[in-house]
Amino acid sequence: MAYPQWATMRFTNLENFCRNERSIEHYMKSVRTLITSSLFLLVFAGGALAQSVQTDYDHNFNLSKLKTYAFAQQVRRQGDPLAASSINDRRIHDALDSQLRANGMADSSQPDFVISYFVTTKKNLDIQDNRLGFFQRMGGSINVNQITEGTIVVVFVDSVSNQEVWRGYVSGTINPKDLDKDVNKGITKLVQKFKKNQEGKK
């Protein structure tokens, strides 16, 4: 049976429309899959970056002249996390001393700068959503765990002016089983950042 030309044109247009609709739907599914996969990777990448290091300093002060150091005699007050653990106090002290020496500085009775440090802690929740992408269709779950986040704050004071000239922060989740490794890793990054600051780099 022969169809009129106008009918044939309509059937052709309808067929093209349906084909385009299927193409668009397939494209949107691909985009949704790509976005979901990217979010999934970002969630796990964020979890891998457990430590963050930040510094601040007086840009009008010449940090490069700081070569020798000494540790301030600090009195730990009640409520200070380091007051309750002399082991952790020594752990931070020894890590700083070791890394500063490794970077060409020396302990001195007449230091260029004096070091003090303290720790802050807070409770938080670690929420892991496993329902993204493929796992959503498989009936994933949300895991919620209580964690303790800690920050080591290190302050360098110029011996001549008695003014603070540099401050560094190391933040991360506290795991009692990995304290030695985590403290050494964080202090290493912090001293490396100080060396860059001495060169005028951020």
Image: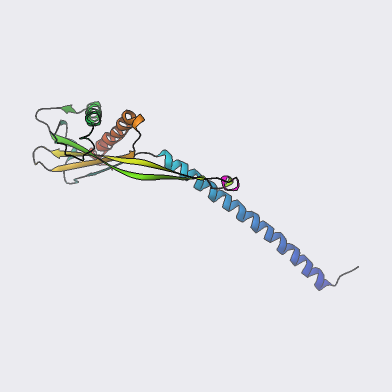
Residue nearest the observer in this picture, 164 or 94: 94
Instruction: From the viewer's perspective, tell me whether residue 5 is left or right of residue 111.
Output: right
When asked about the image quadrant of residue 148, the answer is top left
Q: Which residues are magenta?
A: 135-139
- The C terminus, quarter of image: top left
Dominant SS type (magenta): helix
Residue nearest the observer in this picture, 192 or 172: 172
Magenta-span inclusion, residue 156: no
Instruction: From the viewer's perspective, tell me whether residue 197 is left or right of residue 15.
Output: left
Residue 166 at x, y = what percent? Answer: 20, 41
Residue 118 at x, y = what percent? Answer: 21, 38
Task: Please tell me how many numbered marks the rendered image carries.
Answer: 0
Residue 21 at x, y = what percent? Answer: 68, 61
When asked about the image quadrant of residue 17, the answer is bottom right
Residue nearest the observer in this picture, 50 or 199: 50
Residue nearest the observer in this picture, 108 or 103: 108
Instruction: From the viewer's perspective, tell me whether residue 119 is left or right of residue 127.
Output: left
Q: Residue at x 9, y 28 (%)?
A: 109
